[in-house]
Image (cartoon, rainbow, N blue to C red):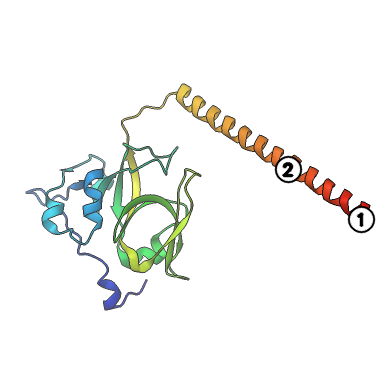
Amino acid sequence: MFMTEESNQNFRVLTTITTPDADELIVHVPLPAQSVYAGELSDPSFVESLPTYSLPDYKYKVGTHRSFDVPGNSMEPTLFEGDKVVCAFLEPTLWESGIKDNYAYVIVTRSDVVVKRVRNYLGSSKELEVISDNSFYETYRIPLADLREIWYVRARITPFLPSPQNIQRYVHQEMVELKATIAQQGKLIDRLGVSVEKALSGQNRG
């Protein structure tokens, strides 16, 4: 994606932390720090104050990686609040061609940090459409001018160990809610049918 000097002003210089041997560390952005991280006040000294660590897999030795606490429940059942996602930095020049539809990304805007799936409309309308796995949350779009950083989710670190019973219970609850919704819609259709019949009956008498 071609960016002018003016559009480049929206993006910050990325601060990285290295070991004495020049190995880059993963910077972790905990939930309480995310509003500051996303804001205009973020600076190198703030990033340097965040916790850092490394992972043994070689893929985390190449490129810049950062991890974020997952905020809220908008990505359930894929990601849960309390999970951490380990992400690779995506250069702004690669956004238009490199952001893949329906993959999960951490998106840093001027005021927020969100974890979402995306659809890439940067080439056509200069927007990203962001989608939650939790159907309770609506899809919305973020204009290019509001984007500051984008991180591709590569792994999840979770304190939860799902069991077959938990998964079965979750699916059962989903089915119960679905049946309740269908039942409510059925009642609405029945009432609508009665109303239509009454209206037609009144017209025939007239």
User: At 62% across and 33% down in the image, what residue appears?
Assistant: 180
Query: Which residue is located at x 37 percent, y 37 percent?
Result: 80
Q: Secondary structure at mark 2?
A: helix
* Residue 191 in the figure: left or right of residue 142: right
State the residue lying farthest toward the top: 165
Q: Secondary structure at mark 1?
A: loop
* Residue denoted by label 2: 189
Give the labeled residue for mark 1: 206
Q: Which residue is situated farthest in the right direction here?
A: 205
Taking the image as shown, residue 203 lies to the left or right of residue 149, namely right
Question: Quarter of the image containing the C terminus?
Answer: bottom right
Q: Which of the numbered marks, if any, corresponds to residue 175? A: none
Q: Can you give x and y, in whole percent of width and height, for residue 8 in the image?
A: 27, 72
Between disc 1 and disc 2, the foreground one is 1
Instruction: Describe residue 197's horizontal placement relative to residue 190 as left or right.
Output: right
Distance, label 1 to label 2, CA atoms, is 26 Å
Q: Nearer the viewer, residue 18 or 168?
A: 168
Q: Residue furthest left?
A: 20
Q: Amino acid at mark 1?
A: Gly
